[in-house]
Image: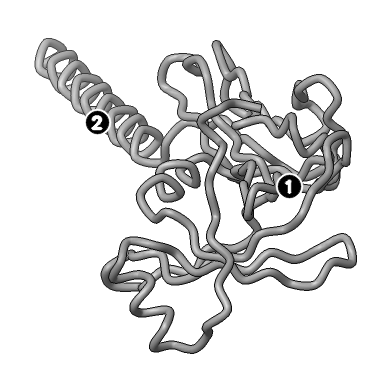
């Protein structure tokens, strides 16, 4: 656990929209912690620090609540749709060694065969992993992959200790020639055919002229 993940949380006893607005105005984020059969705890978190932490998917935070440590996983983040200010967070209690199910982003590495493109059909996969060892992403190597290549969830190389939850046959990446490239190739082929036909007609006309 990185020291960067340590956050001091303040217990709050006041609730309601008005109090939440005052918290946000003070640079803090209202949040609720629940899970493992515990009573929900309402806390206020330092806004700037937490906003930086949750840039990473499935952020794990080591809270200090009145001097007591508590590991939590970010479950939900509610933002203002216009200003993108964090309005509220839901946090789930986790234990060291406990396994959790999370959606992990998929990242492409490498370049497919020239003239083709690799398209993500699924931007994330569901994995079961230890709460304290959640990977930032799952890499998919498409180096040299040719047109028609399909990579499913079953083909992924998972981080150590991770188990696949997503259906194995789920398509993750497809490699193909772009439609505009195909259209351009067809236009070139048609143009070449027209030129060849014109040249053939000219040659036939020339032969007929010679015969006369």
Instruction: Identify the element where label 1 is drawn.
Output: strand
Viewer-proximal residue among 176 and 22: 22
| Residue position marked by numbered label 2 in the rendering | 191
Q: How crowded is mark 1: few (under 14 residues within 10 Å), some or many (20 or more)?
A: many
Q: Is residue 132 left or right of residue 2?
A: right
Viewer-proximal residue among 89 and 117: 89
Cα distance, mark 2 to mark 1? Answer: 53 Å
Q: What's the residue at 19%, 27% (across, down)?
A: 198
Quarter of the figure that contains the C terminus? top left
Q: What's the residue at 35%, 73% (across, down)?
A: 81
| Residue position marked by numbered label 1 in the rendering | 102
Whether residue 17 is situated above or below residue 10 in the rendered picture: below
The count of marks equals: 2
Name the spot of residue 205 as percent of width and height, x first: 15, 22
- Residue 35: which disc? none
Q: In this view, does 156 lie to the left or right of 122?
A: right
Name the spot of residue 101 as percent of width and height, x first: 80, 48
Name the spot of residue 51 as percent of width and height, x first: 41, 50
Q: How crowded is mark 2: few (under 14 residues within 10 Å), some or many (20 or more)?
A: few
Res 171 → quadrant: top right
Viewer-proximal residue among 77 and 147: 77
Res 182 → quadrant: top left
Name the residue furthest front: 67
Q: What's the residue at 21%, 25% (across, down)?
A: 195
Instruction: Identify the element where label 2 is drawn.
Output: helix
């Amino acid at each position: 656990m990185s020291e960067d993940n340590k956050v001091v949380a303040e217990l709050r006893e006041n609730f309601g929209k008005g109090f939440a607005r005052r918290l946000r105005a003070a640079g803090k984020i209202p949040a609720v912690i629940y899970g493992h059969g515990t009573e929900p705890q309402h806390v206020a978190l330092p806004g700037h620090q937490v906003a930086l932490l949750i840039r990473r998917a499935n952020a794990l935070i080591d809270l200090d609540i009145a001097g007591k440590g508590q590991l939590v996983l970010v479950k939900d983040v509610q933002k203002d749709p216009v200003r993108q200010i964090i309005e509220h967070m839901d946090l789930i209690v986790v234990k060291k060694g406990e396994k959790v199910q999370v959606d992990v982003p998929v990242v492409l590495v490498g370049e497919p065969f020239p003239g083709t493109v690799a398209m993500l059909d699924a931007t994330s996969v569901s994995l079961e992993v230890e709460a304290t060892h959640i990977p930032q992403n799952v890499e998919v190597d498409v180096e040299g992959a040719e047109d028609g290549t399909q990579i499913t969830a079953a083909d992924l190389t998972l981080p150590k200790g991770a188990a696949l939850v997503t259906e194995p046959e789920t398509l993750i990446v497809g490699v193909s020639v772009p439609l505009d490239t195909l259209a351009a190739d067809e236009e070139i082929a048609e143009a070449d055919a027209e030129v060849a036909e014109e040249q053939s007609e000219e040659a036939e006309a020339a032969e007929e002229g010679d015969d006369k």
